[in-house]
Image (tube, rainbow, N blue to C red):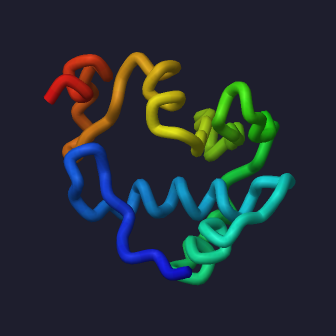
Amino acid sequence: MKIHSAVDVEGKDSDRVLLYAYLNATSESGYVNPIDTAIREYKTFDISTYQKLDEVAYDFNRKRLSILFKKDSRNLIVTKGALKNILDVCSTVIVPRNWVFCVSSVVAT
């Protein structure tokens, strides 16, 4: 399995999305799947400034996995899973240029 690209909510290539996928793929303590392996092999990032604080493992009810990181003085939660389940728990989404939109307005388009 190989990664072709990592895209943002607008369908454009995104190093930020790839970085977050890489953080998740290299930091989860549960089952490593072929997608995680492909992400790790596609491109590497220096993640030495990220400290893993906690993890909520994947389960079949939530259908997502979340990892909490600290970088500098800010916390970041990286979650992967079924898109609908992710959007159901998000109130906003960051799009290119770092603009923040309500999830319902992005999903509706």
- Pinpoint residue 55: horizontal percent, then vertical percent: 79, 39
At x 31%, y 51%, the residue is: 8
Depth check: give the residue in front, 47 or 102: 102
At x 31%, y 22%, the residue is: 103
- Pinpoint residue 62: horizontal percent, then vertical percent: 68, 27
Depth check: give the residue in front, 70 or 78: 78
Q: Is residue 11 above or below residue 68?
A: below
In this view, the residue farthest toward the front is: 60
Left or right position of 13 against 74 = left
The image quadrant of residue 70 is top right
Left or right position of 20 against 6 = right
In this view, the residue farthest toward the left is: 109
At x 36%, y 22%, the residue is: 92
At x 50%, y 81%, the residue is: 2
Q: Is residue 44 above or below residue 73?
A: below
- Pinpoint residue 65: horizontal percent, then vertical percent: 69, 40
The image quadrant of residue 44 is bottom right
Quadrant the N terminus occupies: bottom right
Left or right position of 52 against 76 = right
Left or right position of 24 against 14 = right
The image quadrant of residue 28 is bottom right
Badge count: 0
Quadrant the C terminus occupies: top left
